[in-house]
Each structure stands twice: as C-alpha cells, then as structure tokens.
Amino acid sequence: MNNKSNIKKSRNLMACVGTVLSLAMVGCSSTPVATPTPYKSASTKAAYGYSSEKISESEYKVLFKATDKTPADKVQQYALYRAAEIAQKQGFNYLAIVKTNVDKKPILAREVVAKNDEPVAFQTDRQCTMSGCDEVAQPMAVPSSNDVVKTQINDIYFTIDVKMANDKASLGKNAFTVTEVLSEPLEPKNGN
C-alpha cells in the first residue's frame, strides 16, 4: 500500500472516531438533545414521552412532553393514541377530548451539527533510510466532522382531558372509536 492510501484510511478512521465520540458525549449528558421525540413512555416526571393521570373511572388526563423539533400534529396524534390505549385497557369503546392545553418552556439543548469543512490533512514529514526516502504521516488530534453545540429550543407540554364510554351518544358527536385511533400507524409506512 502506498502512503497516500494509508493517510486517507487514517483520516477516514479518525473522522469516524470523532463522530462516534461526539454522539457518545450527546448520549451521556443530562442536557436534552434537540431532536424529535418518538412515541414512548416518559421514564421519569421530567422525561420526554407520554404520561397519564386518572381523574375518575372514565376520565383521564394524558400528557405528551416533546421537543419543538417534533411536529405539532405528531404530538397531538401521540397524545390521542395514548388515550386510546388507556381506553382499550379500561374496556371502553369510545373516547372524546374534553379539553386541550399546550405549554411551551424554553430550555437549552444539545444539537449535533455536521461541519462541511474538509478534514484537516495530516502533517507529513520525510523520513529517509538507506533504502530511500518516504513521506510519513504524523499523528494529530482527531478531526471531527460533527460538533455538539448548545441551542435554545422549547419543551412542548401537550395535555388532553379525555372522557371514555361504551356508547358514543354519551360522549357527543366528536367521539372517537378506540379501534379506529389504534389502527392508525404512528409512523408513516416506508415510501411515504
């Protein structure tokens, strides 16, 4: 192999290592990441995802906490989907949204930003021996193709109060069928 090929392989390897280290730093920090929030249970009171509170035998408050990188229609769909899961588990066939509320709170978050800069070239030195001279790459700091920066985003708190029943008439004309809500996929199918 020639030295230029070795230098290129080393540069690519170091760029990959830099990316992995950047992402590892993002994963280990307690600062939130500025990315869309997937449908999931909130593991703690401060975590992102859904949580719920029982108000009465047939009424629940459902909260979906997300970053503002999550589309608003997705946040609404996630809250309604969670309400339908609860209704199904409790044995109800219909649900209706009684009240909605949206709060926004600004926070600092981390965001991985890709650099468009070319990777820094390795310094080369000439090394001569009795068999001739070669250019030798000298090790340098790991170049990174990504940076982790702090950015201001909003935490979105979308809350719905939901009534549940087994007859649609008791909930009014805006009632949803639990099975219809649960039949809608949360993520678009491939190709859409």
Image (cartoon, rainbow, N blue to C red):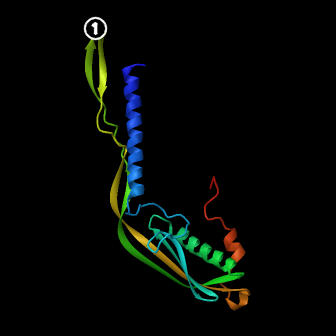
Check disc 1 and report the residue beneath it: 130
Residue at far right of view:
167
From this view, report whether residue 12 is shown above or below residue 176: above
Residue 175 coordinates in the image, percent (x, y): 67, 83
The image quadrant where one finds the N terminus is top left
From this view, report whether residue 62 is shown above or below residue 113: below
* Amino acid tagged 1: Met
**136 with respect to 62 (left or right):** left
Q: Residue at x 66, y 82 (%)?
A: 95
Residue 147 coordinates in the image, percent (x, y): 35, 50
Residue 90 coordinates in the image, percent (x, y): 68, 81
From this view, report whether residue 106 is shown above or below residue 120: below
Residue at far top of view:
130
**144 with respect to 81 (left or right):** left
**152 with respect to 168 (left or right):** left
Q: Residue at x 72, y 86 (%)?
A: 168
Towards the viewer: 146 or 32: 32
Residue 102 coordinates in the image, percent (x, y): 47, 79
Q: Residues within 10 Å of mark 1 (few under 14, many from 20)?
A: few
Towards the viewer: 135 or 191: 135
The secondary element bearing badge 1 is classed as loop
The image quadrant where one finds the C terminus is bottom right
**5 with respect to 182 (left or right):** left
Q: Residue at x 69, y 82 (%)?
A: 94
